Image (spheres, rainbow, N blue to C red):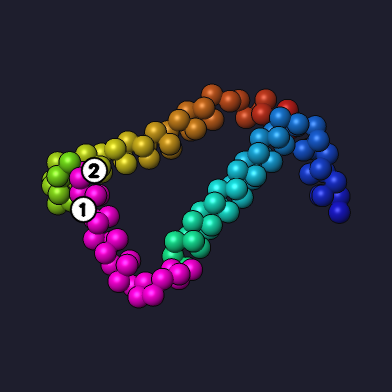
Amino acid sequence: MSGVRHAIRSLWNAKAFSAVAVATIALGIGADTAVFSVVDAVLLRPLPFADADRIVTLTHLNSVRAIRGFVFEVSPSDPATCVAVILVFTLTAIAAAILPVRRALRVDPLIALRTE
């Protein structure tokens, strides 16, 4: 029980952190609800038409043609595209790992422990 009181007291003292945490949780719940609503409407509920599987097949063929127009005729097996995608993902992962580490290395551990 004392752990719960300590957690509440810590959150009350750090109002900015508490507001960011509550906003993050609210955005996560909202995004999850939106994604589930789309999945439920598109994938889980049957279409209200007779022979709905035939309608979906025709729509699927049209969407494939539309998607081909957006990729500007770059094939998935194009080596330059594969290398570029791998390079972008690798650089993003490196940046996501290095930037927080560099920030953490600038903090003196004794000062950080005293402020908590």
- Depth order, front residue of 46/114: 46
| Residue 57: % across, % down | 28, 67
45 left or right of 24 in image: left
Q: Which residue is mark 2?
A: 70
Residue at the image point whose x is 53% and y is 58% from the top: 36
Task: Give the crowd class for mark 2: few <14, some 14-19, many >=20 residues within 10 Å.
Answer: few
| Residue 72: % across, % down | 17, 41
Under mark 1, the amino acid is Arg
Location of residue 114 (image quadrant):
top right
Under mark 2, the amino acid is Phe
Q: Regarding mark 2 in the picture, which secondary structure is present there?
A: helix
Question: Relative to residue 36, is residue 8 depicted above or below?
Answer: above
Residue at the image point whose x is 83% and y is 39% from the top: 9
Residue at the image point whose x is 52% and y is 27% from the top: 103
Location of residue 46 (image quadrant):
bottom left
Q: CA distance from mark 2 to mark 1?
A: 9 Å
- Tell me which label, 2 or 1, sits earlier in the chain: 1
Question: Relative to residue 112, is residue 80 depicted above or below?
Answer: below
Q: Regarding mark 1 in the picture, which secondary structure is present there?
A: helix
Q: Which residues are magenta?
A: 45-71
Q: Which residue is mark 1?
A: 65
What count of labels does the image hold?
2
Location of residue 59 (image quadrant):
bottom left
Residue at the image point whose x is 28% and y is 61% from the top: 60
Can residue 42 be seen here? The reply is yes
